Amino acid sequence: MHLDDLATPCALVDLDRLEKNAEHVADKARRLGVRLRPHVKTHKCIDIARIQTDLHFGGVTVSTLAEAQAFAAGGFSDITYAVPIAPQKIAEAIDLHNEIDALNLLVDHTDTIRAVDEAATSRGEVLPVYLEIDCGGGRSGVDPEGEAARLLARRLAGADSVDFRGLLTHAGHAYRSRTRSEAFEVACEERNLMTALAAELRDLGIPVPEVSVGSTPTMRAIDDLSGITEVRPGNYVFYDVFQTAIRVCQIDELAFSLLATVISVDAVRRRAVIDAGALALSKDAGPIHVDPECGYGLVVTVEDQHPLPGLSIVSLTQEHGTLNGPGVEALRPGTRLRIFPNHSCLAAACFESYQVLRGTEVVDEWHPVRGW
């Protein structure tokens, strides 16, 4: 099948670019002496994860138990569930842990530690658990400079039914960067905070086997990961418009896009409508801290993937995307357009399948995991 034969809207994966992206980060992880445990929530696709983990130890990171179950069924046996686990899901997590080598859990609160320890004890199990640290993103995790980090680490290390695996963080604030140099500063901060806390805990007699960090911007920017044992970037396999805006990657590295069709044109008002709306592109506002007028994605030519600067996606409804700009005059109903989304992870999650391309030829169809 050729690209022209596909119905729209549909999700496209450029396999050549994806393989290069995966190889680049895998090589860098080896060069920096850390394990690569890619975060698969970007694509939720077993075929892609196999490419990412080639020549590495094979561990992956997930964000839902549905992902963990699907990837376990797909042959992945060392999985980190990288959100603080809800107490109601612990029993299900224990069931899955018993089916594979390890389902590593994440906690950041004393109540969750108690719940994990009690549930594991009642089942006669020992569960691998990380303490999540907030290195600046302000989402979940404990303050590395606060007393809670020391108290929770001590409690984890002393729990009878917990195997305290170490510290884990995600530098989400790297996405507030504007340049590669700013991302580098965040990466250094992430590394330094985590290694300092690990060293302090070890001095207190608390073993810290692992120090795990993540994010695509920091992984691309960092040049020294001394004291870190593993990295968990995810978006790098696709990249997206946000990553290009903050100078993490180039446009010719973007591996995920959407194919859409123009369904309405008003040349007088320089407006056109495509059949890809919020349920295809998501409503992620994108890098508005860099470009307030960035719109909802980058419109490019279908085959060569060259930007079309005269077109901007200015609004989205459920099934419609509205384009403005002088480039509208060249469009007609039926014109095909290719779009790089602001956030490839969210856009990819809107689709039940990906059309896999080598050039303009469809060579495969991949299916991501659905559900939580």
Image: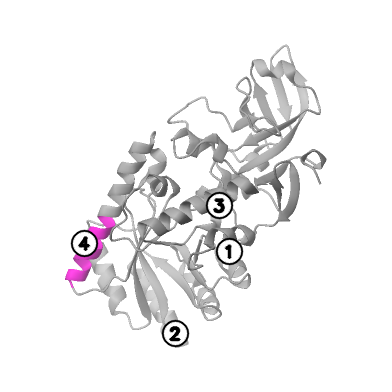
**Mark before the other along the chain sequence, 1 or 3:** 3
Residue beneath disc 4: 147
Q: Which residue corresponds to the image point at 26% horizontal and 54% vertical from the top-left?
A: 193
Number of the label disc, if any, that sits on residue 67 = 1
Distance from the alpha carbon under mark 4 to that under mark 2: 29 Å
**Mark 1 → mark 2, Cα distance in angstroms:** 22 Å
The magenta segment = 193-204
In the picture of the structure, the residue carrying the numbered disc 3 is 42
Disc 1 from disc 3: Cα separation:
11 Å
Rendered position, 121 above or below 334: below
Give the residue pinned by disc 2: 125
Task: Report whether 76 appears left or right of 225.
Answer: right
Taking the magenta stretch, the answer to whether it contains residue 196 is yes
| Residue 73 horizontal/vertical position (percent) | 63, 72
The mark nearer the N terminus, 3 or 4, is 3
Amino acid found under the numbered disc labelled 3: Thr
Q: Where is the C terminus found, in terms of image quarters?
A: bottom right
Image height of 324 relative to 260, above or below: above
Q: Nearer the viewer, mark 4 or mark 1?
A: 1
Q: Are marks 3 and 2 in contact (CB under 8 Å)?
A: no
